[in-house]
Amino acid sequence: EDKVVQSPLSLVVHEGDTVTLNCSYEVTNFRSLLWYKQEKKAPTFLFMLTSSGIEKKSGRLSSILDKKELFSILNITATQTGDSAVYLCAVERGNTGNQFYFGTGTSLTVIP
Amino acid sequence: NAGVTQTPKFRVLKTGQSMTLLCAQDMNHEYMYWYRQDPGMGLRLIHYSVGEGTTAKGEVPDGYNVSRLKKQNFLLGLESAAPSQTSVYFCASSYVGLKKEQFFGPGTRLTVL
């Protein structure tokens, strides 16, 4: 059975801390892994990863994929209160027209 | 551009009533999706469409039907609502090919009493 597991479920940190969010997966015919940020409403796209070992970066956020060990991590450095959100990992299953399986998310709270 | 829009934003139904949720996108995307999001469950795919006139079942299709008569619209129907269908429903759309990012609508909060 295909599954995507994120950890931790929730996290509370102080501004300036660095956090690492984890996403492990078991999906048939893996094609890609995407990270999204969900504040109060709709998820918004952060990164797409398809190849192992290549880090994607955007400002203080970065992500990397390990296709051998079947996981990805999302790092946020120098956290700010605006980083407070639920971070979702989604894994694409091949041959199904961009069909994605989502994890339950990690809820991050950044305290001033 | 409006992106992805959903109507209505909120709805309360009684058990057994029917309703249709409308999703519209103005980005000329081929693919469209309906998800539901429940506490502790993440986003689960209900149905999706890879083009006008085609639909397919996702992870949790039971109790729902969909139609994609026009490329820009994707309708989700509940024929006989049940309390288990209380959820937040998100529509999303995406391009075909290597750009797999999904653009989400603002969501519809549905309560079935």
Image (cartoon, coloured by chain):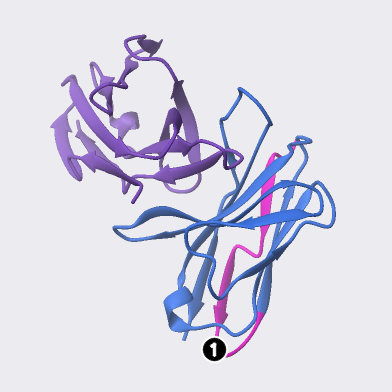
Chain colours: A purple, B blue
- Residue A15 or residue B39, whichever sits in front: B39
Magenta residues?
Answer: B1-18
Residue for point 32% across, 22% down? A67
Relative height, residue B37 to residue A67 (above, below) = below
User: On the picture, is B46 further left or further right than A76?
Assistant: right
Give the quarter of the image for residue B96: top right
Q: Is residue B12 magenta?
A: yes
- Residue B5 or residue B79, whichever sits in front: B79
Rendering coords of residue B105 (x, y %): 60, 48
- Residue B47 or residue A10, whichever sits in front: B47
User: Dot 1: few (<14), some (14–19), or many (≥20) neighbours within 10 Å?
Assistant: few
The answer to whether any part of residue A58 appears in the image is: no
Q: Is residue B88 magenta?
A: no
Relative height, residue A45 to residue B59 (above, below) = above
Rendering coords of residue B56 (x, y %): 64, 56
Q: Amino acid at mark 1?
A: Lys
Residue for point 49% across, 83% down? B82
For mark 1, name the chain. B
Residue for point 41% across, 39% down? A28
